[in-house]
Image (cartoon, rainbow, N blue to C red):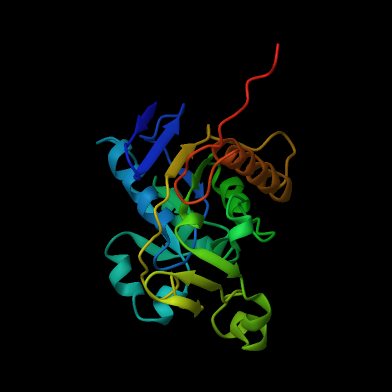
Amino acid sequence: MTALTPGLGPAYASRSAHARRNPALLVANHGFGTMFDMNTYVLGALLKNHRGPNAAPLTILTHDTAWTFGLGPWMELAGFKRANRTNAIEALAAGHLVVVLPGGDVDAAKPFSHRNEVHFGGRTGFAEIALQAGVPILPVVISGAGETVVVLSDGRRLASLLGLPKRLRVKTLPISLSLPWGLTVGLSGMVLPYIPLPAKMRASVIEPMTPRPAEDAEVFAARVLAAMNARMHQMTDGRLPFLGLAWPRRRPSR
């Protein structure tokens, strides 16, 4: 199915049915930020508008930082749970559609030059969960959020110097330019909302993926990531930053 929203809103495209009645692991990518990642809003709209009345119940896995800052209990009321193997397996066993963004802050803090890439930071736990639960992976690729702000650096060195990987389980501290805050370090999009620059956001759902015979979690995860990056390339090839327009292509000379 294909649905388009005119203007600078989201656009969705997929050949796959969104309204899954059976449990599955929906794997999506981050755009920019954690608490205020634009990708989560697009994903929420996608799920709300296209799942159907008889779709499987929904569980969304999210980072521990929400509980660190006291927001976890409130988010649980909306179907969010801590991102760990136990919660994922229990939800899948109960027949839920489980949503996970495996890249975490590594994917959420990509520099502007890498905005049209999906980074999982070597994480394969999502594939292990799918294998253990015996459910397919439903990859969703979202583009455009990386153009709503300009990320100068992911701030990995600074995060390491401050001991954030051990204290908060985050590896990045993005240095970015955004409205209305200007230049910030680890604040805009992470703990502070920002005014997004105009960008065309698109979401594409890839056909469900299952492990091949004798395929282990590491190889399965790499294949899912490759498929998502290939789709991202298709969605953003020739795209102009900020407005989502495409460079005019020259017709081949005869």
Residue at horizontal 56%, vertical 57%? 102
Residue 113 image point, x, y percent: 63, 57
254 and 198: which is toward the camera: 254
Which image quarter holds the C terminus? top right
Q: From the viewer's perspective, is 75 left or right of 217? A: left
**Residue 168 drawn at (x, y percent):** 54, 81
Q: Residue at x 58, y 53 (%)?
A: 126
Where residue 159 sits in the image (x, y, percent)? 62, 81
The answer to which image quadrant residue 67 occupies is bottom left
Q: Nearer the viewer, residue 5 or 22?
A: 5
Image position, residue 251 (x, y; %): 63, 20
* Among the 4 quarters of the image, the one containing residue 175: bottom right
Which residue is most to the front? Answer: 253
- 38 to 240, vertically: above or below: below
- Depth check, front residue: 7 or 74: 7
Evaluate whether residue 105 shows in this view: no
Q: Residue furthest left?
A: 53
Q: Is residue 60 above or below residue 50?
A: below
Residue lying furthest top: 254
Q: Residue at x 46, y 54 (%)?
A: 145
**Quadrant of the image for the N terminus?**
top left
From this viewpoint, is residue 195 visible?
yes
Residue 168 vertical placement versus 11 (above, below) = below
The answer to which of 209 and 91 lies nearer the viewer is 209
Question: Is 191 situated left or right of 252 in this image?
Answer: left
In the picture, measured across the screen, residue 143 lies left or right of residue 221, that is: left
